């Protein structure tokens, strides 16, 4: 967490959390969701329908995205959050707490929040792989879960075939949520 965020938490320890205003899609993109957007429906429904009006406004400011990613985590109840100064902003998820990118050199990087960092990239080591009912590939790491970016499926297949990644186990997204104890919607789960 950034030092400026830690200082703000000490100065204003009782700022109420907020829910519904920030989303993370399966491709690692961040979405701002104002009240009008939230009134149209859930982030997850917007992602499933490909409805940008329901998803929100795509964040494009690189420094803001980097700030969010440095101050991102998942709490004990499995709710993803971003610490914005003294305020905890719970994050709506499309698929999993992390979006994962695979690289030609074998590295796997997470969108945010993992313990290892290399040149601003959060590197992870996969321990298990899962294939959900829709054919999406998930990797387990550090007691968490991330969905492999759709553009990296050929790299994932090659890694599975040559033994760098374990053979996937079939699992439903609902079962993965239970096994890895995360909530797609902190708002629906009553966070804050």
Image (spheres, rainbow, N blue to C red):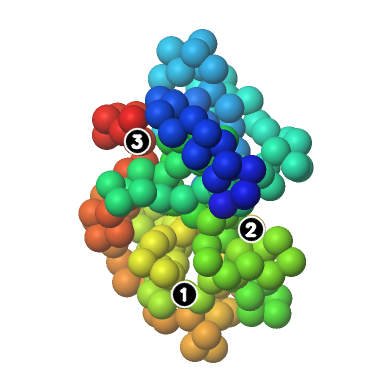
- Which secondary structure, mark 2? helix
Q: Quadrant of the C terminus?
A: top left
One can see residue 51 in this view: no
Q: Mark 1 or mark 3, which is nearer to you?
A: 3
> How many other residues sit within 10 Å of disc 2, few (<14), some (14-19) or many (≥20)?
few
One can see residue 90 in this view: yes
Which mark, by number, is residue 186?
3
Residue drawn at point x = 49 percent, y = 54 percent: 98
* Residue positioned most to the front: 11
Which mark, by number, is residue 151?
2
Vertical arrangement, residue 38 with respect to residue 1, above or below: above
Distance between the alpha carbons at the discs numbered 3 and 2: 28 Å
Which mark, by number, is residue 126?
1
Q: Is residue 190 left or right of residue 139?
A: left
Vertical arrangement, residue 61 with respect to residue 149, above or below: above
Distance between the alpha carbons at the discs numbered 1 and 3: 25 Å
Residue 36: % across, % down: 51, 11
Residue 21: % across, % down: 50, 26
Residue drawn at point x = 48 percent, y = 80 percent: 165
> How many other residues sit within 10 Å of disc 3, few (<14), some (14-19) or many (≥20)?
many
- Which secondary structure, mark 3? loop
Between residues 183 and 151, which one lies in front from this camera angle?
183
Residue drawn at point x = 46 percent, y = 59 percent: 146
Residue 100: % across, % down: 56, 60
Distance between the alpha carbons at the discs numbered 2 and 1: 18 Å
Whichever of labels 1 and 3 marks the residue nearer the N terminus, that label is 1
Whichever of labels 3 and 2 marks the residue nearer the N terminus, that label is 2
Q: Mark 3 or mark 2, which is nearer to you?
A: 3
Residue 142: % across, % down: 42, 69
* Residue positioned most to the bottom: 162
């Amino acid at each position: 967490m950034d030092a400026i965020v830690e200082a703000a938490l000490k100065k204003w320890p009782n700022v109420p959390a907020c829910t519904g205003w920030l989303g993370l899609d399966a491709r690692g993109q961040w979405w701002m969701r104002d009240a009008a957007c939230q009134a149209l429906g859930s982030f997850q429904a917007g992602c499933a329908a490909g409805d940008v009006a329901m998803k929100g406004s795509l964040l494009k400011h690189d420094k803001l995205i980097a700030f969010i990613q440095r101050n991102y985590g998942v709490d004990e109840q499995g709710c993803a959050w971003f610490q914005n100064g003294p305020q905890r902003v719970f994050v709506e998820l499309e698929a999993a707490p992390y979006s994962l990118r695979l690289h030609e050199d074998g590295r796997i990087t997470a969108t945010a929040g993992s313990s290892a960092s290399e040149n601003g990239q959060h590197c992870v080591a996969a321990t298990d792989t899962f294939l959900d009912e829709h054919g999406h590939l998930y990797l387990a790491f550090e007691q968490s879960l991330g969905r492999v970016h759709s553009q990296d499926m050929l790299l994932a297949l090659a890694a599975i075939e040559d033994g760098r990644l374990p053979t996937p186990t079939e699992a439903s997204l609902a079962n993965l949520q239970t096994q890895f104890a995360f909530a797609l919607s902190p708002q629906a789960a009553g966070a804050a």
